[in-house]
Image: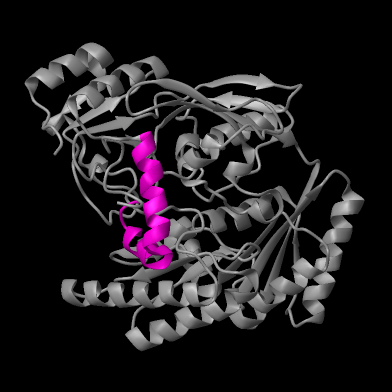
């Protein structure tokens, strides 16, 4: 059993963290009870806004000695309840630790605190003629949150995911010990990779306080291509052909006309084309106009050859902004179109994307519910949304459970996994256990016990 925070704890933790950084009771905003989707709600007993690694170390020493649960939170943009204090206790917010500490031009790395926003890091890198490749849709998420979920995003098809760009982490263990995991080196075969266990662990193993991230030189040229198709089947079936063409686009996104219209309504801005049922949006980058234009032409010609209606070049800043701002707003636009929603963040083999999307359409008809989607067609990571609209509580709960059961079962049948980039948190842990089975979950629980023997860090999440 965990200790309930009392007045003595409040006084002691205020001494450690400072009066202005500690909040209790009505001082805590209700926003801290949930994340972006709000699938689980629980108010923490205490909110602490962290300022430094040493401060976090002292907070954790106190929490460990007194058996107080601690949940770490960044911007709260998660979708599976990872940053919700499910067992109460302390909610430790790291958004105030938001400094970019060092740029190493020689080794192509940048050192950041966990509260730096993705959009801030992206802008900083570009200003210095570098690119930080991971590009999740939620640009206001923190880097600590991205690392904690191993976020991927739209450029993953060419550049990989967050894990591929983390060189070294400074972390605080549950007992308060400060450790460095990994190293500021390009290769590392020095025993078990503890760093890689932490990436994607959703704050259940330790607290990320600093990260050394790899950068790449900024590509000089970037062009997008918007390709309309008569239906989603035709659009998705084009993706394997594109990948086999030996051209590697930076991004391959799929989107339906309905989702684009939601985004238009939400943003109050027109999308370049909404006449067709389905679209593939691609980006190409490189260091010469000739190289990028040739790659784009190869793919455009291929798409037209296999049934695309047209191929629109998106090369001006105005067009790029219109297209990619619409794509970036899809989640919020779908959310605004309904009374409540929940998400299925599956990842399936690339050649099974069409089969899975078709299955969701059949499921929507069967359950008489809206299930819009969009996603990263190039790497098989699909974002499927079940919309409540005017369903009553009982019907919503029933339909939601049936839809999730059916979709995760289908994903497993075709070789997919429960989550591509949003994590497991609280909302999806039951489905993770179903897919992996007892032996796999027991290994994960064993790792958790070694890192956190008292189970005080983000308890009730992922594999518990």
Q: Is residue 430 visible?
A: yes
Question: In the picture provided, is 281 more to the left or to the right than 416?
Answer: right
- Residue closest to the far top: 15
Q: Residue at x 84, y 53 (%)?
A: 292
- Residue closest to the far left: 7
**348 shown above or below 185:** below
Question: In the picture provided, is 389 more to the left or to the right than 215?
Answer: left
Membership of 442 in magenta stretch:
yes
Membership of 73 in magenta stretch:
no
**Place of residue 225 in the rendered image (x, y in percent of width and height, measured from the top left):** 73, 62
Q: Residue 9 appears in which quarter of the rendering?
A: top left
Magenta residues span 425-451
**11 shown above or below 112:** above
Q: Residue at x 63, y 51 (%)?
A: 321
Count how many numbered circles sit on residues in the image: 0
Quadrant location of the N terminus in the rendered image = top left
Front-lying residue, 438 or 258: 438
**438 shown above or below 195:** below
Question: In the picture provided, is 320 more to the left or to the right than 210?
Answer: right
**Place of residue 39 in the rendered image (x, y in percent of width and height, measured from the top left):** 28, 57
Front-lying residue, 386 or 333: 386
**Place of residue 51 in the rendered image (x, y in percent of width and height, measured from the top left):** 37, 19
Colouring convention used in this rendered image of the protein: one colour
**Place of residue 167 in the rendered image (x, y in percent of width and height, measured from the top left):** 62, 32
Q: Residue at x 63, y 71 (%)?
A: 279
Magenta span: predominant SS is helix
- Residue closest to the far right: 290
Q: Is residue 311 visible?
A: no
Q: Residue 25 appears in which quarter of the rendering?
A: top left
Q: Residue at x 35, y 60 (%)?
A: 428
């Amino acid at each position: 059993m965990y200790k309930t925070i009392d007045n003595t704890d409040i006084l002691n933790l205020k001494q450690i963290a400072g009066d202005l950084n500690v909040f209790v009771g009505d001082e805590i905003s209700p926003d801290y009870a949930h994340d972006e989707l709000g699938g689980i709600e629980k108010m923490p007993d205490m909110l602490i806004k962290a300022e430094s690694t040493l401060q976090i170390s002292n907070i954790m020493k106190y929490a460990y000695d007194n058996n107080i649960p601690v949940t770490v939170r960044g911007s709260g943009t998660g979708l599976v309840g990872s940053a919700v204090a499910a067992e109460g206790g302390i909610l430790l917010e790291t958004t105030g630790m938001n400094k970019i500490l060092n740029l190493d031009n020689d080794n192509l790395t940048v050192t950041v605190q966990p509260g730096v926003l993705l959009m801030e890091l992206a802008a900083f890198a570009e200003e210095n003629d570098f690119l930080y490749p991971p590009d999740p849709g939620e640009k206001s998420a923190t880097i600590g949150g991205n690392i904690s979920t191993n976020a991927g995003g739209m450029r993953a098809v060419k550049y990989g995911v967050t894990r591929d760009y983390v060189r070294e982490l400074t972390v605080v263990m549950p007992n308060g010990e400060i450790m460095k995991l990994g190293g500021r080196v390009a290769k590392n075969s020095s025993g078990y990779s503890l760093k890689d266990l932490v990436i994607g662990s959703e704050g259940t193993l330790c607290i990320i306080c600093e990260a050394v991230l790899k950068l790449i030189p900024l590509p000089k040229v970037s062009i997008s291509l918007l390709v309309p198709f008569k239906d989603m089947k035709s659009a998705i079936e084009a993706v394997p052909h594109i990948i086999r063409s030996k051209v590697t686009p930076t991004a391959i996104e799929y989107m339906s006309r309905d989702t684009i219209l939601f985004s238009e309504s939400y943003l109050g801005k027109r999308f370049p084309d909404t006449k067709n049922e389905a679209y593939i949006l691609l980006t190409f980058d490189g260091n010469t106009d000739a190289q990028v234009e040739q790659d784009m032409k190869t793919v455009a010609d291929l798409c037209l050859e296999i049934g695309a209606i047209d191929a629109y070049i998106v090369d001006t800043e105005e067009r790029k902004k219109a297209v990619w701002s619409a794509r970036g707003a899809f989640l919020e636009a779908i959310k605004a179109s309904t009374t409540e929603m929940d998400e299925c963040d599956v990842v399936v083999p690339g050649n099974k994307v069409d089969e899975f999307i078709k299955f969701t359409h059949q499921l929507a008809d069967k359950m008489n519910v809206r299930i819009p989607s969009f996603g990263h067609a190039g790497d098989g990571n699909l974002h499927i949304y079940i919309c409540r609209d005017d369903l009553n509580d009982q019907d919503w709960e029933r339909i939601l459970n049936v839809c999730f059961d059916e979709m995760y079962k289908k994903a497993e049948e075709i070789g997919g996994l429960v989550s591509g980039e949003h994590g497991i948190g609280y909302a999806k842990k039951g489905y993770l256990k179903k897919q992996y089975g007892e032996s796999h979950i027991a290994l994960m629980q064993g790792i958790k016990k070694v890192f956190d023997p008292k189970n005080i860090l983000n308890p009730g999440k992922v594999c518990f």
